[in-house]
Each structure stands twice: as C-alpha cells, then as structure tokens.
Image (cartoon, grey):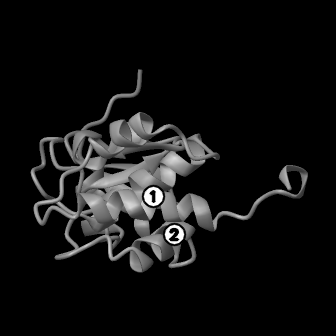
Amino acid sequence: MIRYEGKTPISLNVNGENQEVAVRPSDLLLDVLREQLGLTGAKPGCKNGDCGACTVIMDGWPVKSCLVLAVEAEGHLIWTVEGLNGTALVQRAFVEANAFQCGYCTSGFLMVCHALKMQHPVLPEEYVVEEWLQSNLCRCTSYQEIRKAVRKMYDMMEVPPWRL
C-alpha cells in the first residue's frame, strides 16, 4: 500500500500528457486540475457529486472529479474538456443545437456525451441516452437542446464504408 503524507508528488496523465503535481491525500482531482494544471473547464458546482459540472473522462468513462481524490487518479487516463480541443463532434453538435444557455454545465455535459459516444459508437436507444444525461444538471433547463445535440452528434459521425 502506498502511504501519502503531506504533499506527495504524483504523476497524472491528463489529455495525453504526463503531469507532475504535488498533492495532499485529501486533494480532489477537480481542485488539482483547476489550481495546479490550470484546466478550468471542469467546474466546481455542488462539490458533492450531484450536478456533474465537474465531469471528466477517466479511462473512457465519465466521472465527477469532485468525488475523486487526485491520488486515486494516478495511473489512469484522464481527459478534460480542454483535451477535446474544439475538434470533437460533440462540441460542434452542441453549438449547432444551441445546447447551452449560461454555459456553466456545458463542459460536464460535453464530457458525458463524448463518453457516451465512446462507449456506444452507434446511437443507443433513447432510454440509454436519458440514463447517461441524468448524471448532470442544467439549471437553465436546456435539456431538449442537449438531447437534440446528442442525436446531432451521432448524425454527424462518418458512416464507415462497410455500413453503406
């Protein structure tokens, strides 16, 4: 068992790059991403796992970074909204569907939807999409537009030649 005391240096793989950070055992991944790495896309909303504004992708699955200790993230692949680099289909779909109002929840929803596409390369049944979207809250109630963005994201995906 690894013993962490005081500030301990750890290595995090964030957006494809190894990052060295010094953390206390109680430091949240959310805070380390924002304060030490300057990746402020994950937002501190509720800090208890209810809102999803802090969602990142860890090993291909969406996780709420306010519920993950930074030391628990060592050895895992972490992707933040900054790692999408404005090139992901999900981002274009959100813009085209106007799937945001104030924007505070948007990065969390982008990461959930991006992970949904990773785990379900073909548009899943509606109940699956609803189940995935339930993990995040939008106080501005852009839910219809977010659902539209998910469908648009799948529509925008290139159809492989063997499926034509």
- Residue at 60% in and 63% down: 155
Front tag of 1 and 2: 1
Q: Nearer the viewer, residue 43 or 10?
A: 43
Q: Nearer the viewer, residue 162 or 109?
A: 162
Q: Which residue is mark 1?
A: 150
- Residue at 28% in and 41% down: 69
Can you say whether 160 is above or below 47 in the image? below
Residue type (three-letter) at the residue carrying disc 1: Val
- Residue at 53% in and 42% down: 59
Other residues around mark 1 within 10 Å, as few (<14) / some (14–19) / many (≥20) = many
Q: Quadrant of the N terminus?
A: top left
Can you say whether 87 is above or below 13 in the image? below
- Please, what secondary structure does the residue beneath circle 1 have? helix
Q: Quadrant of residue 144?
A: bottom left
Q: Which residue is mark 2?
A: 84
Residue type (three-letter) at the residue carrying disc 2: Leu
Q: Is residue 80 visible?
A: no
How far across and how far down the image is residue 63, in percent? 36, 43
Give the mark, 1 or 2, whose residue is nearer the N terminus.
2
Q: Nearer the viewer, residue 33 or 144?
A: 144
Q: Is residue 124 left or right of residue 158?
A: left
How far across and how far down the image is residue 111, in percent? 41, 57
Q: Nearer the viewer, residue 120 or 29?
A: 120
